[in-house]
Image: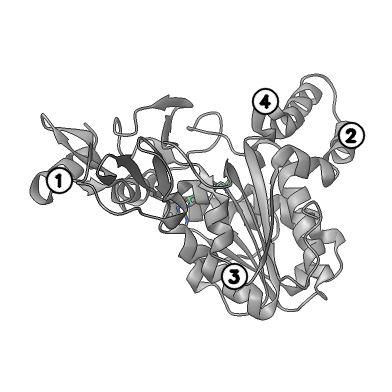
Amino acid sequence: MSALAAILRARIAAAGPMPLDAYMAECLMHPAHGYYSTRDPFGAAGDFVTAPEISQMFGELLGLSLAQAWADQGAPAPFTLAELGPGRGTLMADLWRAVRVVPGFREAARMVLVETSPALRAVQARTLAAAGAAPQWAAEAAALPEGPLFAIANEFFDALPIRQFRRGPAGWHEVQVGLEDGALAFGLSPPGPCPDPRFAADPEGSVVEIAPAAAPVIEALAARIARHGGAALVIDYGGWRSRGDTLQALRGHRPEHPLAHPGEADLTAHVDFEALARAAPALAARGPVAQGLLLTRLGIAARAARLEQGLAGAQRESHRAALARLTAPEEMGSLFRAMALHPPAAPPPPGFG
Ligand code: SAH
């Protein structure tokens, strides 16, 4: 049994079942035993692979879209260039190299990485130093500086804890983590009111999810963008309004039961883009557009061809495979989607028009 499993069992035995978001928060961010607090989970040796780790093209093209949005808004200087949940820092490093071609962008940018994990902050520091950048860190979006803000978040919102509800004959039951014969087990709360008016007409048997931490993050970004200009690009898997049980656990690239190894598996849920857009009523929301379509609009075919010129043999094959993984509908191309938030008076970032 993991150390965290023992801690959670003792707590539940003493205080009763905990809602799913409290369980997820402990699993992902417990200071000593949390999944992200303690490790670098990315890549072939880790538990999952993300788009920036597949190819530099991802960070380059999204970075150029963000930089064009900055230029379209009059190139405000200085401004905050932020990433939420930067992982290894790969996306930001690729962005930083690509935006050299945008006059004034790097000089005006103050880079801030929103990251809670000390282990990943250390990895990000190394990656960004190698790319010639000097980032600062913030623990949460609310701590970002006041001023124009151009921000990006890839696979960040799927890591935020969710609450899950099931509609029964007498009302909505919240999914809880409790104990059964001494082991962690899912249970249901007594029936209560509908957790979100959007789901009021859903029939009995429906499962819905809400991520209570997501709206405050968007509100923090939107407040700065609405006041001072800017844009936020959010890329993740999910859809417009979340339906069904989307909680999943991945360990060593394999799905497993979310209660099997607390703190040792990545726990995620689909992102509800409608909930994000609703948290920013003062901004225009574009998309979500499928990742494959977005990257195609941003010119990934030409960029891939250019990069391929220097490659041969196995390197060329893996470059072609990376292109397919990012864009093909049966791979990441349609499951992953991107949404842009920007001031209504400003043009949408390239790819989102
Ligand atoms: N964007 C990266 C990593 C995605 S994994 C990539 O595409 O490869 C999720 C990232 O979000 C990790 O860096 C994790 O430590 C961070 N994270 C998760 N929850 C967070 C929170 N509540 N606040 C800040 N960072 C968080």
Q: Residue at x 49, y 73 (%)?
A: 143
Asked if labels 2 and 1 touch by Cβ distance under 8 angstroms, the answer is no
Q: Which mark is residue 12?
A: 1
Which residue type carries mark 1?
Ile
**C-alpha span from label 4 to label 3:** 33 Å
Q: Secondary structure under badge 2?
A: helix
Relative image position of residue 186 (x, y in whole percent): 24, 35
Q: Which residue is mark 4?
A: 330
Does label 2 or label 3 sit earlier along the sequence? 3
**C-alpha span from label 3 to label 1:** 37 Å
Does label 1 or label 4 sit earlier along the sequence? 1
Q: Nearer the viewer, mark 1 or mark 2?
A: 1
Residue placed most toward the observer, 51 or 164: 164
Q: Which residue is mark 3?
A: 222
Is disc 4 surrounded by few (<14), some (14 to 19) or many (20+) residues within 10 Å? few
Is disc 2 surrounded by few (<14), some (14 to 19) or many (20+) residues within 10 Å? few
Which residue type carries mark 4?
Glu
Which residue type carries mark 2?
Ala
Q: Which residue is mark 2?
A: 305
The answer to whether the beta carbon of the residue marked 1 is less than 8 Å from any atom of ligand 1 is no
Relative image position of residue 62 (x, y in whole percent): 74, 51
The answer to whether the beta carbon of the residue marked 3 is less than 8 Å from any atom of ligand 1 is no
Does label 4 or label 2 sit earlier along the sequence? 2
Q: In the displayed image of the protein, which residue is found farthest to the top? A: 313
Q: Residue at x 65, y 73 (%)?
A: 225
Relative image position of residue 185 (x, y in whole percent): 22, 33
**C-alpha span from label 2 to label 3:** 37 Å
Q: Residue at x 59, y 45 (%)?
A: 236
Quadrant in the picture for the N terminus: top left
Which residue type carries mark 3?
Ala
**C-alpha span from label 1 to label 4:** 41 Å
